[in-house]
Image: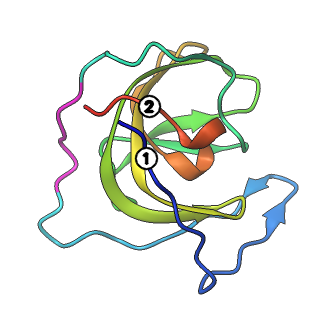
Amino acid sequence: MRKISSIGAAVVLTIASAGAVVAGTAGPASAGCSHSHSNVDGKFGQLFNATNVNIRTGPHTTCASLGYGQLSHTVDFHCFASGDRVTANGKTTYTWTYLRDVTTGVSGWVADALLDNLGGNVAC
Protein backbone atom coordinates (compact mmCIF):
# COMPACT_ATOMS: atom_id res chain seq x y z
CA MET A 1 0.00 0.00 0.00
CA ARG A 2 1.38 3.44 -0.88
CA LYS A 3 0.45 6.65 0.86
CA ILE A 4 -0.65 9.88 -0.75
CA SER A 5 0.29 13.28 0.66
CA SER A 6 -1.11 16.70 0.01
CA ILE A 7 0.57 20.05 0.17
CA GLY A 8 -1.35 22.49 2.33
CA ALA A 9 -1.23 26.17 1.47
CA ALA A 10 -2.90 27.17 4.72
CA VAL A 11 0.15 26.57 6.86
CA VAL A 12 3.37 28.48 6.37
CA LEU A 13 6.45 27.01 7.95
CA THR A 14 9.91 28.30 8.51
CA ILE A 15 13.01 26.24 8.94
CA ALA A 16 15.09 27.35 11.88
CA SER A 17 18.74 26.51 12.35
CA ALA A 18 17.75 24.19 15.21
CA GLY A 19 15.42 22.15 13.01
CA ALA A 20 12.07 22.13 11.29
CA VAL A 21 9.13 24.04 12.67
CA VAL A 22 6.17 21.72 12.50
CA ALA A 23 2.52 22.69 12.39
CA GLY A 24 -0.07 20.05 13.07
CA THR A 25 -3.68 19.71 13.94
CA ALA A 26 -4.71 17.74 16.97
CA GLY A 27 -6.90 14.71 16.50
CA PRO A 28 -10.28 14.34 18.11
CA ALA A 29 -10.42 14.19 21.89
CA SER A 30 -11.03 10.45 21.59
CA ALA A 31 -7.81 9.92 19.62
CA GLY A 32 -5.73 7.61 21.77
CA CYS A 33 -1.99 7.41 21.94
CA SER A 34 -2.00 3.63 22.04
CA HIS A 35 -2.00 2.25 18.51
CA SER A 36 -1.18 -1.23 17.24
CA HIS A 37 1.89 -1.75 15.09
CA SER A 38 4.02 -4.55 13.74
CA ASN A 39 7.53 -4.79 12.34
CA VAL A 40 6.72 -5.46 8.69
CA ASP A 41 8.46 -2.69 6.72
CA GLY A 42 12.21 -3.32 6.91
CA LYS A 43 13.26 0.13 5.64
CA PHE A 44 16.49 1.05 7.47
CA GLY A 45 18.95 3.94 7.44
CA GLN A 46 19.40 7.62 8.23
CA LEU A 47 15.83 8.58 7.38
CA PHE A 48 14.95 11.67 9.46
CA ASN A 49 14.75 14.78 7.25
CA ALA A 50 14.97 17.31 10.09
CA THR A 51 16.61 17.72 13.50
CA ASN A 52 14.92 17.36 16.88
CA VAL A 53 12.09 15.25 15.47
CA ASN A 54 9.59 14.13 18.12
CA ILE A 55 9.19 10.39 18.50
CA ARG A 56 5.74 10.03 20.07
CA THR A 57 3.69 7.40 21.91
CA GLY A 58 1.00 7.52 19.20
CA PRO A 59 0.29 8.99 15.75
CA HIS A 60 -1.04 12.28 17.11
CA THR A 61 0.58 15.62 17.92
CA THR A 62 -1.00 15.49 21.38
CA CYS A 63 0.74 12.22 22.30
CA ALA A 64 3.75 12.44 24.60
CA SER A 65 7.24 12.67 23.16
CA LEU A 66 9.60 9.84 24.08
CA GLY A 67 12.70 11.42 22.58
CA TYR A 68 14.09 13.25 19.57
CA GLY A 69 15.42 11.94 16.28
CA GLN A 70 18.34 13.61 14.51
CA LEU A 71 19.56 13.63 10.90
CA SER A 72 22.54 11.45 11.84
CA HIS A 73 20.45 8.78 13.61
CA THR A 74 19.84 5.37 12.07
CA VAL A 75 16.23 4.18 12.19
CA ASP A 76 14.32 0.99 11.45
CA PHE A 77 10.81 1.53 10.03
CA HIS A 78 8.14 -0.92 11.22
CA CYS A 79 4.87 0.25 9.58
CA PHE A 80 2.64 3.30 9.06
CA ALA A 81 -0.86 4.32 10.15
CA SER A 82 -3.22 7.27 9.82
CA GLY A 83 -2.96 10.05 12.36
CA ASP A 84 -2.97 13.81 12.75
CA ARG A 85 -2.21 16.13 9.87
CA VAL A 86 1.34 17.48 10.02
CA THR A 87 3.07 19.93 7.69
CA ALA A 88 6.86 20.19 7.57
CA ASN A 89 9.51 20.71 4.93
CA GLY A 90 6.87 21.76 2.39
CA LYS A 91 4.89 18.50 2.75
CA THR A 92 1.59 17.76 4.46
CA THR A 93 0.88 14.20 5.56
CA TYR A 94 -1.86 12.42 7.49
CA THR A 95 0.22 9.31 8.13
CA TRP A 96 2.80 8.41 10.75
CA THR A 97 5.47 5.72 10.77
CA TYR A 98 6.22 3.55 13.79
CA LEU A 99 9.99 3.20 14.00
CA ARG A 100 12.89 2.36 16.24
CA ASP A 101 15.68 4.94 16.51
CA VAL A 102 18.57 2.47 16.54
CA THR A 103 20.98 5.19 17.67
CA THR A 104 19.07 5.93 20.90
CA GLY A 105 16.93 2.80 21.31
CA VAL A 106 13.70 4.85 21.41
CA SER A 107 10.68 3.41 19.56
CA GLY A 108 7.55 5.35 18.66
CA TRP A 109 5.56 7.26 16.04
CA VAL A 110 6.93 10.00 13.76
CA ALA A 111 4.90 12.13 11.35
CA ASP A 112 5.77 11.08 7.80
CA ALA A 113 6.42 14.69 6.73
CA LEU A 114 9.56 14.46 8.91
CA LEU A 115 10.89 11.29 7.26
CA ASP A 116 12.67 10.69 3.96
CA ASN A 117 10.34 9.62 1.13
CA LEU A 118 7.36 10.35 3.40
CA GLY A 119 7.95 7.46 5.77
CA GLY A 120 7.21 3.77 5.61
CA ASN A 121 5.54 1.88 2.78
CA VAL A 122 3.78 -0.93 4.67
CA ALA A 123 0.58 -0.33 6.64
CA CYS A 124 0.32 -1.56 10.24
Q: CA distance from mark 1 to mark 2?
A: 7 Å
Tell whether 106 sits left or right of 116.
left
**Chain-order first, disc 1 or disc 2:** 1
- Which residue is at a point 20% across and 72% down the rendered structure image? 28
Q: Amino acid at mark 1?
A: Lys
User: From what the image shows, is residue 4 above or below residue 56?
Assistant: below
Determine which of the numbered discs, if any, sits on residue 3 in the image.
1
Q: Which residue is mark 2?
A: 121
Q: Are marks 1 and 2 in contact (CB under 8 Å)?
A: yes
Residue 68 image point, x, y percent: 58, 37
Q: Is residue 40 above or below residue 81?
A: above
Does any portion of residue 47 appear in the rendered image?
A: yes
Name the residue at 64% across, 61% down.
Answer: 88
Residue span colored magenta: 32-37
Give residue 83's position: percent from left, percent from top. 32, 56
- Helix, strand or loop at disc 1? loop
Q: Residue at x 58, y 77 (%)?
A: 8
Residue 22: x %, y % from top left: 61, 64
Q: Is residue 115 visible?
A: no
Decide if residue 36 is on the left or right side of residue 100. left
Q: Main secondary structure of the magenta part?
A: loop
| Circle 2 residues within 10 Å: few <14, some 14–19, many ≥20 | some
Which dot marks residue 46? none
